[in-house]
Amino acid sequence: MSGIDPATGDLLEISVSTVITRIERRPAPAGEDLPFVAPGFLDLQVNGFAGIDVNGPEVTADRIVEISEALALIGVTTWVPTIVTASEDAICHSLRAIGQARSRSPELAHAIPFAHVEGPFLSDQEGPRGVHDATQIRPIDADEVLRWQEAGPVGILTLSPHTDDAPPQIAQIAALGIQVAIGHTHASGAQIIAAVDAGATLSTHLGNGIFPQLARHPNPLWTQLGEDRLTCGFIADGHHLPAETLEVMLRAKGIDRAFLVSDATELARKQPGLYETAVGGTVELTDTGRLSYVGTELLAGAASDVAAGLRFVLRSTRLSLADALALVTRTPGRILGRKTTLRVGAPADLVTLQADGAVVSVWRHGQQIDPA
């Protein structure tokens, strides 16, 4: 395969098996309309996709594999299934399904590195809680998290550090090898800093899961934007963050401390309408792609995908293609402990794409698949 290096403009000739075996670099020929080449995209927050939910009693290993297949068709070759606030039994049920899916092959284990549990240790206040089930919100409990790990692979946990015992609980969770993310919170600036001191390293979909009206300063957004120890996820679907807000936040964090997530639900790629969901009740998907909880202004997750988020960033901000790609490759890869770059020996999960981010072709484990 071949394509243009977005960072240098060189033509790359890439040979692959299951990994990249050779990269030859030379000047790109003039006058040819060649696609760019990049690692496959990573999405660290996927609640569901293409009619399949990671949550609820219906999820199975087969369904998790189906999501992985569907995401690969749009260029997302690595993804993190995200389990939202629920009972301990329900969380463990989803974790078992994810673990069983990963155990089927080394390729699936690579594509699905672990699970992200978003909740149930979140704010109990209207606004920051979002549409998470109020009856299942509960205090941070590292012992419960340890029990989750017995059911399946937990790699990221989103919580709100608004309680006095949050720092020691966060330290215990981080000691389990889990990356702690701050989200759906009404915590003060001091409580956020204490959480980071205790081991929190991420912010979940910053700018969302928060009160609709905030004090000018201080407020949780400024604290997280200014804290260099936090790497922040952003939903770039045009609904969760206006374009100018997203651009300012990306400038504040820089591409090495920012990454895109979809926050996709099972309704991603569905037609507009009213839907009943296992974890959100009745939600409405509009013809503009906005997904909201019926009767409120609250967003109910997203109905887009991270490949669309890349395209939104390219048309709505000043980021170059190379920098925008870092938000869906290099930075989330670092969070996974991977060096997600074009290099010999890297997994042969690759995409070619146009300057506007539109995916042309996808390679997964060295095999070309037809993009959706």
Image: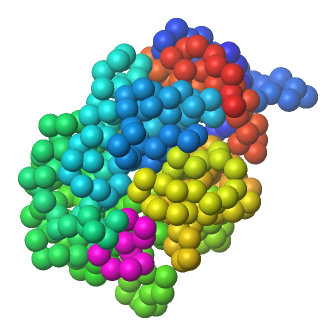
Question: Looking at the figure, which quarter contains the C terminus?
Answer: top right
Q: Residue 212 or 130: which is nearer the viewer?
A: 130
Q: As displayed, is residue 118 above or below residue 326?
A: below
Magenta-tinted stretch: 124-132
Q: As displayed, is residue 148 above or below residue 285?
A: above
Q: Is 229 left or right of 314, judged from the image as shown?
A: left
Based on the picture, tell me whether residue 130 belongs to the magenta stretch.
yes
Q: Quadrant of residue 27?
A: top right
Residue in the picture at 34% in, 25% down: 102
Q: Is 140 left or right of 60, judged from the image as shown?
A: left
Task: Indicate the position of residue 193 as horizontal and vertical percent values.
Answer: 24, 72
| Main SS of residues in magenta | loop
- Image mark count: 0
Q: Is residue 226 visible in the rendered structure shown here? A: no
Task: Indicate the position of residue 213 as horizontal and vertical percent values.
Answer: 48, 87
Task: Indicate the position of residue 144 as horizontal and vertical percent values.
Answer: 13, 52
Based on the picture, tell me whether residue 370 belongs to the magenta stretch.
no
Q: Is residue 101 visible in the rendered structure shown here? A: yes
Residue in the picture at 69% in, 22% down: 370
Residue in the picture at 54% in, 77% down: 296
